[in-house]
Amino acid sequence: MNRGANGESGPVLDPIPFPLAMGLSALIAIAVYNSVELFIFIFRTFSRRRGLYFWSAVCATTGILLIPILCLLRFFALANPGTMASLISVSWMCMVTGQSLMLYSRLHLVLCDPRKLRWLLCMIIGVFVFIEIPVGTLFAVNNFFFTGARVATAYDVMEKLQLSVFTVQECLLSGLYLYEWAGVRKELEITKGPRVRRLFHELIGLFILVLALDLSLVGLQFSNQFKIQITYKPVVYSIKLKVEIYVLNTLVALLNSNYNCQQGLPFRDQTIPLHTRAEDDPWPPQNIHSVNAAGEMARQRSENSTMCGSLSSTGSRIAKVPRIMLGA
């Protein structure tokens, strides 16, 4: 079987077995369904349709929708393979970089160091410029000009390197949420209640899901199952995007909450506000605070309540002393 027969440098030339064809059809249908569902969810959830969070989610969802459709047209020679390969490369960049930017856009909720945030943004941009663009160019050239084995081999090596880098990048971004939240989880439970623990478990689940799905993609990539892995990728990213949007929205809603679980009464937070713009949030602008600032305020409230409790007990003891002993 030559490279074109597998679909990496043109349409699939060999007949596809019926079980494989059914599997590819199922993957394409799942990816398209998930992308449509994501579009509906995004446009119904975001009250302010602007900002990095909103547009990165739209960009990633658009890539998820286009990739399976373009692959279908390319595999069965229903359109020019070079044009389809170029559009697939652009859609792949939208899907992967958009998802990474969406995770980055909410990192300020748990990470308050601007220098670290800049380094993470530089990492995402560097991966896009130095890895995604070269791999996409090789894929398009390989399909436009049907080059020899040298270019095809270079593309194969770069594609495996690209997916490995993406795995590390996305695990790093999702792992940062878990690491930073674990540092102040106990303090936040003082003011936010059991929802903090529940969100911590959801962040653990998010990290495990991202790692497992990315490792399954890497396994397919290194097994050279091109037809399967290129249609499996949008399914994986659609599942990850659904879970990430749910967890990030829960995180924003929790930090946006002004409910004191100890007293059962609303209170107005006076924590340090984040350096963020209101239009980046899917809810109307309110006082949203970082997890670290909220944790510090929780510790202060705990200390104040302890001090007030000791003063109250001291006062009650004094009240019980006979008046003659107090010089009355």
Image (cartoon, grey):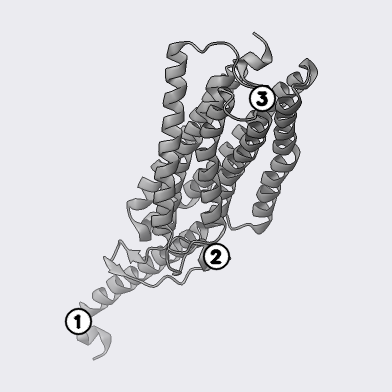
How far from the left and from the top, in percent, is residue 250? 40, 52
What's under tag 2, amino acid-wise? Leu
Q: Residues within 10 Å of mark 2 (few under 14, many from 20)?
A: some
For the image, the number of numbered tags is 3
Which quadrant of the figure contains the N terminus? top right
Position above or below: 34 against 103:
above
Does 40 sit left or right of 160 as displayed? left
Does 3 sit left or right of 296 as displayed? right
What's under tag 3, amino acid-wise? Lys
* Residue drawn at point x = 41 percent, y = 32 percent: 30
User: Which dot, 2 or 3, sits closer to the camera?
Assistant: 3
Disc 1 target residue: 322
How far from the left and from the top, in percent, is residue 79? 60, 30
- Pick whichever of labels 1 and 3 is earlier in the sequence: 3
What's under tag 1, amino acid-wise? Pro
Disc 3 target residue: 160
Question: How far apart in space, not on screen, are marks 2 and 3 (Cα)?
Answer: 38 Å
User: Which dot, 2 or 1, sits closer to the camera?
Assistant: 2
* Residue drawn at point x = 70 percent, y = 26 percent: 143
Q: Residue 274, labelled with which disc? A: 2
Give the structural element (helix, strand or loop) at label 3.
helix
The residue at the far top in this view is 1
How far from the left and from the top, in percent, is residue 99? 55, 44
